[in-house]
């Protein structure tokens, strides 16, 4: 009976561990070996600065990093101007969207936003799929305080099949918050995009399509 009890306990523990791993790996870019690897990927993407002219800063998640494609194929390369990217896989507006400390958008904006930063494009929402609305609101408010009086374009989450059930709610909350802050909002959930086999991240063609839509919105703000 003791042996059987131990086996049952081990099975329960294994199930709990598997559930935790599934939750972590299910986030947009939260897979891999941990925060150190994601930080290294963020640093690599940060080194790629494209274009020339007024500076645009992109703050985002694994989409902005270009997880699953080459950095040069990631959607921010389609934007006009001199584009810097501060992306971190698995991150979001909410502080706890990522399991990595200080990865939320507002905290990263403290160092990413510079004196010569003009437009700030904030892309995300997929990793906030399981966060309370209050946490989304708090993270959004903190981000807007860090950005200050700069122009901001918030790019909402696309309808990734792996997050399809949660996207409408996140999209609605972000659209409301953007309106309350007088910030431009670009909904992306009606855009049909090609995804990688994980049904969460974009193919190179998906990045091109995503980037071109955002570039059109940026052009409308800067004209």
Image: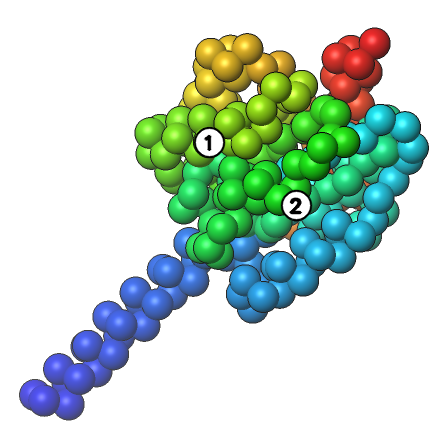
Q: Which residue is depicted at the point 52% across and 49% down?
A: 103
Residue nearer the viewer, 113 or 2:
113
> What residue did someone put label 1 on?
142
Residue 134's place in the image compared with 163, above or below, is above
Disc 1 on helix, strand or loop? helix
Residue 99's place in the image compared with 87, above or below, is below
Residue 21 quadrant: bottom left
Q: Quadrant of the N terminus?
A: bottom left
Q: Residue 214: give x, y in percent of width and height.
A: 74, 24
Question: Residue 204 vs residue 142: left or right?
Answer: right
Q: Residue 93: give x, y in percent of width and height.
A: 49, 36
> What residue did someone put label 2 on?
87
Q: Nearer the viewer, mark 2 or mark 1?
A: 1
Q: Which residue is depicted at the point 83% across and 49% down?
A: 48
Residue 136 quadrant: top left
- Neighbor class of circle 1 (other Cα within 10 Å; few <14, some 14-19, many 20+) is some
Give the farthest residue toward the front.
115
Question: What's the CA distance linking mark 2 and mark 1?
Answer: 18 Å
Q: Which residue is depicted at the point 68% across and 28% down?
A: 120
- Taking the image as drawn, is residue 166 in sight? no
Q: Residue 69: give x, y in percent of width and height.
A: 77, 51
Residue 82's place in the image compared with 63, above or below, is above
Q: Residue 106: give x, y in percent of width and height.
A: 52, 37
- Taking the image as drawn, is residue 80 in sight? yes
Residue 212 quadrant: top right
Tell which circle, 2 or 1, labels the residue nearer the N-terminal end: 2
Disc 2 on helix, strand or loop? strand
């Amino acid at each position: 009976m003791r042996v059987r009890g131990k086996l049952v306990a081990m099975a329960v523990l294994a199930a709990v561990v598997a559930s935790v791993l599934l939750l972590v790996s299910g986030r947009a870019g939260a897979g891999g070996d941990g925060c150190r690897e994601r930080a290294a990927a963020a640093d690599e993407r940060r080194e790629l600065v494209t274009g020339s002219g007024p500076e645009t800063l992109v703050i985002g998640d694994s989409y902005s990093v270009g997880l699953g494609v080459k950095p040069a194929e990631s959607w921010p390369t389609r934007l006009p101007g001199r584009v810097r990217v501060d992306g971190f896989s698995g991150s979001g507006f909410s502080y706890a969207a990522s399991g990595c400390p200080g990865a939320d958008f507002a905290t990263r904006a403290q160092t990413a936003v510079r004196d010569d930063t003009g437009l700030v494009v904030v892309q995300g929402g997929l990793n906030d799929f399981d966060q309370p609305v209050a946490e989304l609101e708090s993270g959004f408010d903190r981000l807007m305080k860090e950005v200050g009086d700069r122009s901001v374009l918030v790019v909402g989450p696309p309808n990734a099949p792996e997050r399809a059930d949660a996207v409408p709610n996140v999209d609605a909350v972000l659209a409301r918050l953007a309106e309350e802050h007088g910030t431009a909002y670009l909904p992306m959930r009606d855009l049909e995009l090609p995804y990688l086999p994980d049904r969460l991240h974009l193919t190179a063609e998906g990045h091109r399509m995503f980037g071109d839509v955002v570039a059109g919105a940026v052009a409308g703000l800067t004209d």
